[in-house]
Image: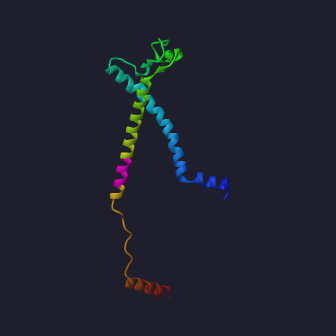
Amino acid sequence: MSVVSEFRSFIAKGNVIDLAVGIIIGGAFTGIVNSLVNDIIMPIVGAIIGGIDFSDYFIPLSSTVTAPTLAAAREQGAVFAYGSFVTVILNFLILAWIIFLMVRVVNRIRLAEEKKPVEEAPAPPPADVLLLAEIRDLLKAR
């Protein structure tokens, strides 16, 4: 088997396609979660703790850094931006929670499907009934 045909058969497998779709949807979902955290959750948390914006929390690592915002401070020198890290951790926790809830729902659906009674095919008629039906069909054909 040549490398090209082996690669083609690898790509054609369903699980590779499913993985690609999952990565694409995951990338789009990351944008949604980032917006949820940055635009909705962090402002609420900031309002609860006194209007503080986590994104501008940093510790200057150089005496030349005197700026009040993270963006300006990064231009002046090295900073320890723990506010951004807190935001990323919250993004991760929210994303993990949402994925957990989705997996939980899917598992419940699967469990419900497994518990459904399986409709069995009707049992075949006994041999004597089959024989009588065959005799009947032969008599009709004459």
Residue 100 located within the stretch drawn in magenta: no
At horizontal 63% and vertical 55% (from top left) the residue drawn is: 6
Judge whether 45 appears above or below 140 on screen: above
In the rendered structure, which segment of residues is drawn in magenta? Answer: 105-112
Report the front residue among 131 and 62. 62
Left or right: 66 in relation to 114? right
The image shows residue 18 at horizontal and vertical percentages of 52, 48
Report the front residue among 72 and 14. 72
Magenta: main secondary structure: helix
Count of marks overlaid on the render: 0
Judge whether 131 appears above or below 6 on screen: below
The image shows residue 81 at horizontal and vertical percentages of 45, 22
At horizontal 68% and vertical 57% (from top left) the residue drawn is: 2
The image shows residue 56 at horizontal and vertical percentages of 43, 19
Judge whether 115 appears above or below 121 on screen: above
At horizontal 31% and vertical 21% (from top left) the residue drawn is: 48
Report the front residue among 56 and 120. 56
The image shows residue 84 at horizontal and vertical percentages of 44, 25
Q: Dividing the image into 4 quarters, which one contains the N terminus?
A: bottom right
Judge whether 80 appears above or below 18 on screen: above
In the rendered view, how is the structure colored? rainbow
Residue 107 located within the stretch drawn in magenta: yes
Report the front residue among 139 and 85. 85
